[in-house]
Image: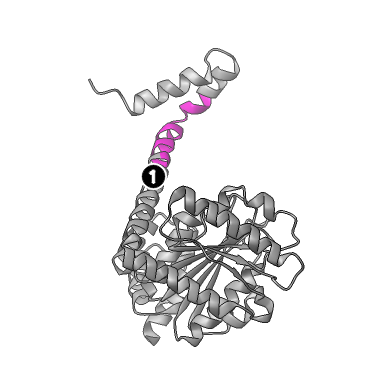
């Protein structure tokens, strides 16, 4: 392993001579349990290296073992602290954990602000816990564009659990439901948006609800309101799983173990009912469609922008010699001609 580590340290992005061979070695070392190799491979994927597809393809056959737990909710609900406490309980059970903490992008550098990693200091010192902060880089829905890829790398590495904490930007963080096996929606009393959020899409994706900061005034009333909503939805949808509503005070480590028991109950429900395969099939379908759209878009734009004619077209549109609507249809027609 020492020789491999020296080889990894010698990698520089400007050297293309042996980079493919080195990256193949990097994938192999991830599968063998090298934390350093995992960190390097995640960086390659986050930077959208053109070879990412190849490397992720090598990782993919080794995925599917980790249970992916999504934690979402509005800012100020204590998601990071809750993630830290859940991680601690899993570690006491001798489970290995990967954490993907999606942070807001810096408006100046585009990088992650790393606030979540700071709030998870206890977990970050554990060699069997790997925390990766990711910048959204303008991506909507509470996740970064490459979050699903990073999950696969952690899964292929051998993590038992991968916890994904969304950025916490508001009520539209529904992308996590397409990524996680179990999704937790975290609410807290006294934030002023609890009732409003119950009408939003984020309340429709929860497998479990957590009322965090339950030592505050209004916690019991919020629990009651959420439970009423859950009962109403269960009757309308005739759902086989009725999402439990639990109270925690994460900063005091109160209610964390019962929460993990509820998470395990949901996992058992998915496995025993056969829904886990259905959920993962739908996730795979959505992800493959997304990848397909991105690849088609990239290839099409390369063809359109590569010959320099697009700028001439813009000049014609500005001069009103052409209109943008007809022009777009003509461009698409040249790339995807109708079959005779």
Judge whether residue 322 can be spotted in this image. yes
Q: Is residue 204 left or right of residue 110?
A: left
Residue 96 sits in quarter: bottom left
Residue segment shown in magenta: 297-312
Q: Is residue 166 left or right of residue 235?
A: right
Judging by the rendered image, the residue that carries numbered circle 1 is 295
Residue 286 x/y as whole percent: 39, 49
Instruction: Please say whether residue 302 is one of the residues in the magenta stretch.
Output: yes
Judge whether residue 104 can be spotted in this image. no
**Front-most of 189 and 112?**
189
Residue furthest to the left in view is: 340
Figure check: 305 above or below 44: above
Residue 288 x/y as whole percent: 36, 50
Figure check: 12 above or below 254: above
Residue 214 x/y as whole percent: 69, 71
**Front-most of 268 and 108?**
268
Quadrant where the image shows the C terminus: top left
Most common SS among magenta residues = helix
**Front-most of 111 and 88?**
88
Residue 202 x/y as whole percent: 57, 52
Residue 57 sits in quarter: bottom left
Q: Residue at x 44, y 74 (%)?
A: 264
Q: Residue at x 58, y 84 (%)?
A: 125
Q: Residue at x 34, y 79 (%)?
A: 32
Figure check: 179 above or below 285: below
Instruction: Please say whether residue 316 is one of the residues in the magenta stretch.
Output: no
Residue 55 sits in quarter: bottom left
Q: Is residue 58 left or right of residue 323?
A: left
Q: Residue at x 66, y 74 (%)?
A: 119
Figure check: 39 above or below 196: below
């Amino acid at each position: 392993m020492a020789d491999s580590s020296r080889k990894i340290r010698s990698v520089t992005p400007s050297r293309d001579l042996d980079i493919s061979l080195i990256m193949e070695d990097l994938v192999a070392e991830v599968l063998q349990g090298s934390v350093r190799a995992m960190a390097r491979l995640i960086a390659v994927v986050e930077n959208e290296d053109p070879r990412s597809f190849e490397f992720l393809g090598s990782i993919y056959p080794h995925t599917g073992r980790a249970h992916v737990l999504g934690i979402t909710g509005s800012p100020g609900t204590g998601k990071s602290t809750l993630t830290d406490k859940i991680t601690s309980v899993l570690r006491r059970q001798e489970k290995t954990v990967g954490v993907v903490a999606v942070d807001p992008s810096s408006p100046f550098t585009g990088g992650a602000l790393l606030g979540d990693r700071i709030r998870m200091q206890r977990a970050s010192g554990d060699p069997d816990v790997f925390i990766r902060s990711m910048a959204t880089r303008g991506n909507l829905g509470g996740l970064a564009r490459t979050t699903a890829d990073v999950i696969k790398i952690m899964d292929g590495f051998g993590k038992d659990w991968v916890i994904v904490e969304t950025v916490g930007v508001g009520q539209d963080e529904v992308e996590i439901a397409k990524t996680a096996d179990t999704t937790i929606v975290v609410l807290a009393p006294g934030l002023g948006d609890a009732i409003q959020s119950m009408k939003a899409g984020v309340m429709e994706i929860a497998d479990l609800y957590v009322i965090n900061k339950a030592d505050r005034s209004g916690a019991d009333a919020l629990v009651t309101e959420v439970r009423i909503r859950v009962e109403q939805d269960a009757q309308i949808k005739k759902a086989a799983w009725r999402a439990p509503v639990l109270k925690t005070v994460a900063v005091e480590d109160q209610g964390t173990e019962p929460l993990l028991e509820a998470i395990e109950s949901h996992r058992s429900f998915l496995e025993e009912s056969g829904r886990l395969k259905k959920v993962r099939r739908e996730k795979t379908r959505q992800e493959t469609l997304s990848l397909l759209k991105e690849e088609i878009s990239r290839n099409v734009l390369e063809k359109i922008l590569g010959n320099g004619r697009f700028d001439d077209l813009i000049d014609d549109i500005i001069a009103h010699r052409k209109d943008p609507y007809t022009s777009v249809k003509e461009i698409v027609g040249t790339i995807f001609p109708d079959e005779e």
